[in-house]
Image (cartoon, rainbow, N blue to C red):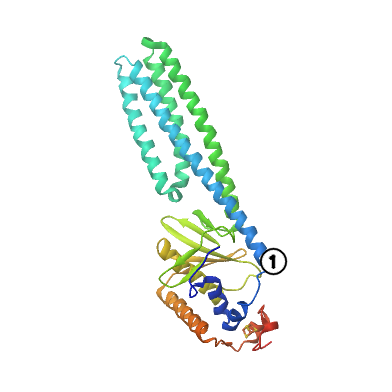
Amino acid sequence: MHIFPVDFISAGDIEKYSYCPLSWWLSREEHHEDSEGVKKHREIGMQAKKGMKAYQRARNSERTVLYLAIGATIVSLVGISMIYSSYTLGIIFDVISVFWLIAALYFLWKSERYVTMWHDNFKKIMVVLPLAATVFSILSVTFVMEPNKIICYIMEISSLLWLIFATFFFYLALRSEMSYEKIKKELRLPDGEIIYVDDLERSPILKSEKYGIWGRPDLLIKVGEDFIPVEVKTGRVPKGPYFSHIMQLTAYMVLVEENYRAPPYGLLKYGPQVYRIEYEEDLKNLLLEKVSEMRKALKTGEVHRNHNRPGKCKHCSRREICPERLA
Ligand code: SF4
């Protein structure tokens, strides 16, 4: 259980307050049940977690393929060095192998940093590198021949085995990648790596010591160098994003800013509809205003309806117990 100083305010409470201050006030007495919304959130969380694992599996397999490509190149290089008897072709393959090795190492380094940007190219590279390394190895053995036939055969067999392993891991990478893409498509998420999923119990809480707020975004997606919070809303799909949801998402953006770096935007997802909300100074100031109003309300205990819209009360889940309801 997480303990916060009393004046820490949650992103969920900011959402309720922004809908109607009285709704937030009344919700403080509520016991949270396993509502449909919570169940739906849990399902989405589980699906996103599956996607997160598939992505990690794909990345691990891709890395293994690259290691194998480097290994195949080394085998090829060693094979050439050990058996060539000063033929020009031997030297040529030697040079090509060295370049191949540098290229494989370069792409391995790149894959660690810019995987989402380079992804499709990587797939091609990962097929080409071990294949080509093996071909060079076989060619080197075939052309240089004579002096040490046993080494020739060993190198040839090693390279082929390397290729078989590389192909197998490539298949695993592709399979996990496809599973990740499928989940991402079902959830309609942007490109990038899911690095955080709120499972309502065990996910770490993000805190802002600076502004005294805390929360758990539904998802965090790493897009390039940025961390994009995603808030998933269940129920009916509105024509545009609700103000209260924008405030909640802004709170997550503030939390991401303090824990990672300022995100350029956040995403509000209503079923198939996804809205992009830019993280701007005005929006952040508006959020901080709401937070300070909430703090004031907590001190004074004075909280009232701040609107004249019966429609709002009609859809409010606290209207049965609300003394100021309009419908
Ligand atoms: S019923 Fe209306 S006034 Fe009461 S909490 Fe809900 S939205 Fe606010």
Q: Quick one: quadrant of the C terminus?
A: bottom right
Residue at image point 40% right, 32% down: 70
From what the image shows, is residue 118 above or below residue 255? above
How far from the left and from the top, in percent, is residue 299? 50, 84
Residue at image point 38% right, 10% down: 146
Q: Quick one: quadrant of the N terminus?
A: bottom right
Quarter holding residue 77: top left
Quarter holding residue 128: top left
Where is ligand 1, by quadrant? bottom right
Q: Is mark 1 within 8 Å of ligand 1?
A: no
| Residue 176 horizontal side relative to residue 99, left or right | right
Q: Is residue 263 visible?
A: no
In depth, the one of 201 and 316 nearer the eye is: 201
| Residue 126 horizontal side relative to residue 53, left or right | left
From what the image shows, is residue 114 above or below residue 42? above
Could you tell me the amino acid type at mark 1?
A: Glu
Quarter holding residue 308: bottom right
Q: Which residue is mark 1?
A: 36
Element marked by disc 1: helix
How far from the left and from the top, in percent, is residue 315? 67, 79
Residue at image point 38% right, 42% down: 109
How far from the left and from the top, in percent, is residue 82? 34, 17
In this rendering, the count of numbered labels is 1
Q: Is residue 130 visible?
A: yes
How far from the left and from the top, in percent, is residue 205? 51, 62
